[in-house]
Image (cartoon, rainbow, N blue to C red):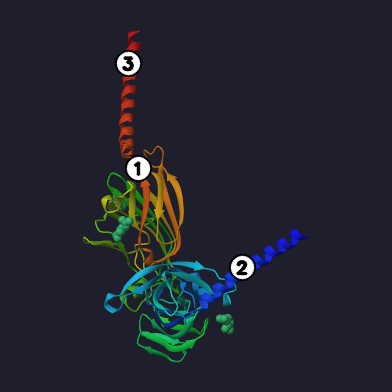
C-alpha cells in the first residue's frame, strides 16, 4: 500500500513538473511582442528570398533568451536556408551579429505551424527590445501557370503567401513589400491597404494583429528568368600534395519552369531571340575561383567547345552553352572540370593538422540544387579527417583507390538537399598527414624498377648458368 502511494506521489510530482515546464514555456513566449515588422519578398529569380526585420519587445516579468519564427507547413517544406542576425548600434555604426537558429517542434501548434528558434546572444530583460534581421530562401515556390507554354509565350507564375506575417506573437505594426521581375503583374489578391507601383507590391501597414493571424494572397506575374534546377550535382575535389586541386563536377540540369508545348523552331528562335522562347536559357555562368586552369566542359558525346573563360586576379567566370537551348522540362547532362593551385586552398592549422578551405555549393549562378554531393578526396596516408560546416549536411567517410594507390585515399562525403547560392560559403576538411607518405608513390615506382632490374639480372644470370652447363 505504502509503496503504491509513494509511486503515485512520484507520478503526480512528475506530471506537475511537466505541466509547469510547458506552462512556463508558453508564458515566456507570449510575453514577447513585435512592435514593428517589415518584410521584403524578392521573387525576381526562381529562388524566393524573404528579408524580415522584427523589433521584438519583452513585456513579461522574466527575461527571454529565444525568439520563435513561425512558418506555414507548406512554406517550411521549401525553406532552403534561414539565417538570423541581431542588429547592434544605430545608423552609421550599425552592425550585425549572427544568431544560432534551429528548426523547432512545438506540441499542438495551430494548423501545423512549423518553427525556427533564434537564440539571442544576451537575455532580453523586461521592457527591453531588440531588432532581429531574418533572411530565408524558398525553392520550388513559384508555380508556373499556365503549366505548359509554347515557344512564343512568356512564362507566368503564381506565388502564394500571406499578407500578414505569420507570427507566434502579437504584431503591433507591420508591412510587406513584394518585388517582381517587371511590372507585368497579371493579378494580385487585395488585402486593404494594398498597392502596386511598377514592379513593387505593397501590403499594409496593418496594425494590432493577434498571434497566428493569416490572410492568404496569390500573385500572378511574368517571370522569364532561367529556372535552372540541378536535379543532381556531384562535386569531386581531389587534393594532390604535388600542388594541384582537381575539381570535377557532374551535372544533371533541368529547366524547372512551365513545360514546353508544341515543336521547337530553331529558325523562329534564332530569328527573334528576344521574343521567342523568352523563358528558355542558352547560357549559364559559373563563378570559379581565380587562377583556375585546364578547364574543360563535356557531355556524353564529347567536348563542348562553346564555353568562354574570363579570368582576373579576383575571380574567373566560365560561360557555358549547352548543345541546345533549354525549354521548360528539358534536361542536359554534362561535366565541368578544372584545376586550381593547391596553396590557395590548403593550409596548416595551429595544431599541425592540414585543412582544405573551399566553397560548398554550386558555382553556377542562381541555381537550385535538389541533391548535392561533395566528395573531398584526400591524399593517400591521410588520417582522422573531419569536416566543418556552418550548416547541417550528412557526412560519411569512404575510401577510393586509384592508379598506384596501396592503402586507398580517404574520401569525406558531404550530402545536402535543397541547396541555393547562399550555401556557397567556405567549409573546411581537417586531416593529419605524415610528409613521409609523399614519398610513397615515388618509392613504389623506384622499387618496381628495381625489382624489374633484379629480375632481369637474375634471368640473365640464369641464362648464362644454363649455357655454362
Ligand atoms: C487554421 O486554418 C483554418 C482554415 O484554413 C482557418 O480558418 C483558421 O483560422 C486557422 N487557424 C489558425 C489558428 O491559424
Ligand atoms: C577534351 O578536352 C580535354 C581538355 O581540354 C582534352 O584533354 C581532351 O583530349 C579532349 N577530348 C577530345 C575527345 O577532344
Ligand atoms: C576560408 O576562406 C575564406 C575566404 O575564401 C576566409 O574568409 C576564411 O577565413 C577561411 N577560413 C579558414 C578557417 O581559413
Q: Residues within 10 Å of mark 1 (few under 14, many from 20)?
A: some
Query: Residue 373 falls in which quadrant of the image?
Result: bottom left
User: Hey, which residue is sitting farthest front in the picture?
Assistant: 2
**Tag 3 and tag 1, C-beta contact below 8 Å:** no
Q: Nearer the viewer's eye, disc 2 or disc 3? A: 2
Check disc 3 and report the residue beneath it: 461
SS at mark 2 in the image: helix
Of the two numbered discs 2 and 3 on the same chain, state the one appearing first in sequence: 2
Distance in Å between CA atoms under marks 2 and 1: 51 Å
Q: Residue furthest left?
A: 313
Task: Say whether residue 469 is left or right of residue 71.
Answer: left
> Does residue 433 show up?
yes
Which residue occupies the foreground of this view, 358 or 248?
A: 358
Q: Which mark is residue 18?
A: 2
Contact between labelled residues 3 and 2, with CB atoms less than 8 Å apart: no
* Rendered residue at 41%/38% (across/down): 407
Name the foreground residue: 254 vs 195: 195
The residue drawn where x is 60% and y is 71% is 20
The relative height of residue 144 versus residue 249 in the rendered view (above or below) is below
Amino acid at each position: 500500500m505504502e509503496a503504491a502511494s509513494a509511486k503515485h506521489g512520484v507520478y503526480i510530482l512528475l506530471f506537475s513538473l511537466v505541466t509547469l515546464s510547458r506552462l512556463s514555456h508558453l508564458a515566456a513566449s507570449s510575453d514577447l511582442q513585435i512592435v514593428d515588422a517589415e518584410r521584403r519578398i524578392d521573387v525576381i529569380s526562381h529562388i524566393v528570398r524573404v528579408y524580415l526585420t522584427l523589433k521584438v519587445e519583452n513585456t513579461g516579468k522574466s527575461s527571454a533568451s529565444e525568439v520563435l519564427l513561425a512558418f506555414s507547413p507548406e512554406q517550411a517544406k521549401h525553406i532552403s536556408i534561414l539565417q538570423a542576425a541581431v542588429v547592434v548600434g544605430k545608423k552609421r555604426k550599425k552592425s550585425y551579429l549572427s544568431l544560432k537558429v534551429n528548426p523547432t517542434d512545438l506540441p499542438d501548434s495551430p494548423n501545423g505551424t512549423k518553427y525556427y528558434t533564434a537564440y539571442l546572444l544576451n537575455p532580453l530583460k523586461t521592457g527591453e527590445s531588440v531588432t532581429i534581421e531574418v533572411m530565408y530562401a524558398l525553392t520550388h515556390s513559384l508555380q508556373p501557370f499556365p503549366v505548359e507554354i509554347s515557344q512564343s509565350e512568356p512564362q507566368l507564375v503564381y506565388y502564394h503567401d500571406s499578407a500578414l506575417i505569420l507570427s507566434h506573437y502579437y504584431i503591433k505594426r507591420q508591412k510587406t513589400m513584394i518585388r517582381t521581375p517587371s511590372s507585368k503583374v497579371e493579378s494580385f489578391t487585395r488585402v486593404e491597404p494594398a498597392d502596386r507601383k511598377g514592379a513593387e507590391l505593397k501590403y499594409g501597414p496593418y496594425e494590432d494583429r493577434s498571434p497566428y493571424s493569416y490572410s492568404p494572397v496569390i500573385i500572378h506575374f511574368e517571370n522569364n528568368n532561367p529556372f535552372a534546377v540541378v536535379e543532381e550535382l556531384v562535386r569531386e575535389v581531389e587534393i594532390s600534395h604535388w600542388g594541384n586541386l582537381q575539381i570535377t563536377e557532374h551535372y544533371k540540369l533541368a529547366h524547372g519552369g512551365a513545360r514546353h508545348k508544341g515543336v521547337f523552331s530553331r529558325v523562329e528562335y534564332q530569328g527573334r531571340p528576344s521574343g521567342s522562347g523568352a523563358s528558355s536559357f542558352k547560357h549559364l555562368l559559373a563563378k570559379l575561383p581565380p587562377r583556375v586552369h585546364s578547364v574543360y566542359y563535356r557531355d556524353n558525346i564529347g567536348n563542348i567547345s562553346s564555353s568562354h573563360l574570363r579570368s582576373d586576379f579576383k575571380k574567373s567566370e566560365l560561360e557555358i552553352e549547352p548543345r541546345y537551348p533549354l525549354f521548360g522540362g528539358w534536361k542536359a547532362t554534362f561535366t565541368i572540370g578544372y584545376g586550381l593551385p593547391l596553396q590557395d586552398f590548403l593550409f596548416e592549422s595551429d595544431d599541425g593538422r592540414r585543412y582544405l578551405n573551399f566553397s560548398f555549393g554550386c558555382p553556377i549562378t542562381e541555381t537550385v540544387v535538389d541533391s548535392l554531393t561533395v566528395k573531398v578526396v584526400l591524399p593517400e596516408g591521410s588520417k582522422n579527417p573531419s569536416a566543418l560546416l556552418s550548416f547541417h549536411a550528412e557526412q560519411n567517410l569512404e575510401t577510393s583507390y586509384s592508379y598506384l594507390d596501396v592503402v586507398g585515399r580517404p574520401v569525406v562525403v558531404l550530402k545536402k538537399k535543397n541547396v541555393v547560392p547562399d550555401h556557397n560559403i567556405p567549409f573546411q576538411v581537417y586531416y593529419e598527414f605524415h610528409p613521409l607518405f609523399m614519398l610513397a608513390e615515388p618509392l613504389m615506382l623506384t622499387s618496381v624498377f628495381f625489382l624489374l632490374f633484379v629480375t632481369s639480372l637474375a634471368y640473365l644470370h640464369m641464362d648464362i648458368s644454363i649455357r655454362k652447363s
